Image: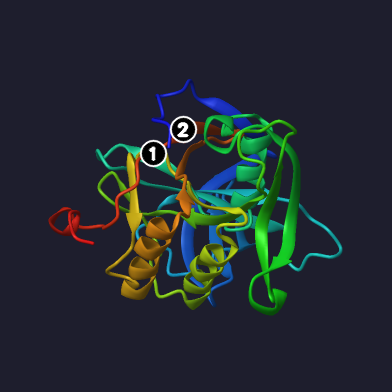
Amino acid sequence: MPVAAAPEAQPVLTLEPLQEGVLLKRYKRFLADVQLDSGEVVTAHCANTGPMTGVLHVGGRVRLRHAPSPTRKLAWTWEQAEVPGADGTPVWVGINTALPNRLVRATIEAGCLEPWLGPIAGIRAEVAYGANRRSRIDLLLTPAEGAADPRPIYVEVKNTTWTDGDLALFPDTVTERGQKHLEELMGVLPDARAVLVPCLSRADVARFAPGDSADPRYGELFRQALDAGVEVLPCRYDFRQEAVRWLGVVPVQRHSSPATEGAP
């Protein structure tokens, strides 16, 4: 894997105008009440159904997208949360789990990942694969003609917001679905390339590791996947009110604890 130099922050996704407010409560997994800066209290859709470890702060600043539509029950969507960063400075975190696939695709289309993936001619989303073709890969890439490695590239994207200092961790809870994705990525080898992209949705992290304490089985499978040849490209992003900027690829650790980093 190439060593990632610190790139100039590159905008890769423009956001619709976001409005700021204060989080009053999150409930029933999908709902959040927010008091906007105007004083109005609104109920927003929360696309992140997980525990949101470390980024769920009642009374904290949040950003919402307003998109009223006859087909939507709620006109507001919770997009970002402001939390204490690794150095104590506030940092904005992308919490909408529906966004990372678009974000990583835009990063690939902008050519940011060409040093790792090679030139790409085509991108397809949600392609059936795996055992009995019952799973769908987030992105299936077709290398450009003349690429050094002509194999198709299966890309699985994971939104990552949990941290320990400047170490980004995934998952923050037991994820049988995530475990299955690792097994199925290993299953496409060696006929194709398999790439796991932890989408690090905050700018204050510098490394990535599996969240062993939250899901030990995922950690075991993660290390098996590395040994089998699955590539891991943790992409770090800076979330702004008007855009998301790509900050590069950060190093991967096999374990979340330094004490076990030398272990198998």
Q: Is residue 27 above or below residue 199?
A: below
Q: Is residue 1 above or below residue 63?
A: above
Are the two marked residues, 1 and 2, in contact with CB atoms closer than 8 angstroms?
yes
Q: Which element carries disc 2, helix, strand or loop? A: strand
Image location (x, y in percent) of residue 135: 66, 72
Residue 149 visible in this rendered orientation of the protein: yes
Residue bearing the label numbered 1? 250
Give left or right: position of 114 versus 178: right
| Residue 97, quarter of picture | bottom right
Image location (x, y in percent) of residue 81: 47, 50
Q: Which residue is drawn at 43% across and 37% down?
A: 1
Q: Distance between the residues labelled 1 and 2?
A: 7 Å
Q: Residue at x 86, y 63 (%)?
A: 70
Residue 49 visible in this rendered orientation of the protein: no
Here the colouring is rainbow
Specify the amino acid type for callout 1. Answer: Val
Q: Which residue is drawn at 46% across and 23% down?
A: 7
* Of residues 93 and 187, the one drawn nearer to the viewer in this rendering: 187
Give left or right: position of 123 versus 186: right
Give left or right: position of 50 versus 96: left
Q: How crowded is mark 2: few (under 14 residues within 10 Å), some or many (20 or more)?
A: many
Image location (x, y in percent) of residue 13: 65, 36
Residue bearing the label numbered 2? 248
* Of residues 129 and 147, the one drawn nearer to the viewer in this rendering: 147
* Of residues 134 and 191, the one drawn nearer to the viewer in this rendering: 191
Q: Which element carries disc 1, helix, strand or loop? A: loop
| Residue 190, quarter of picture | bottom right
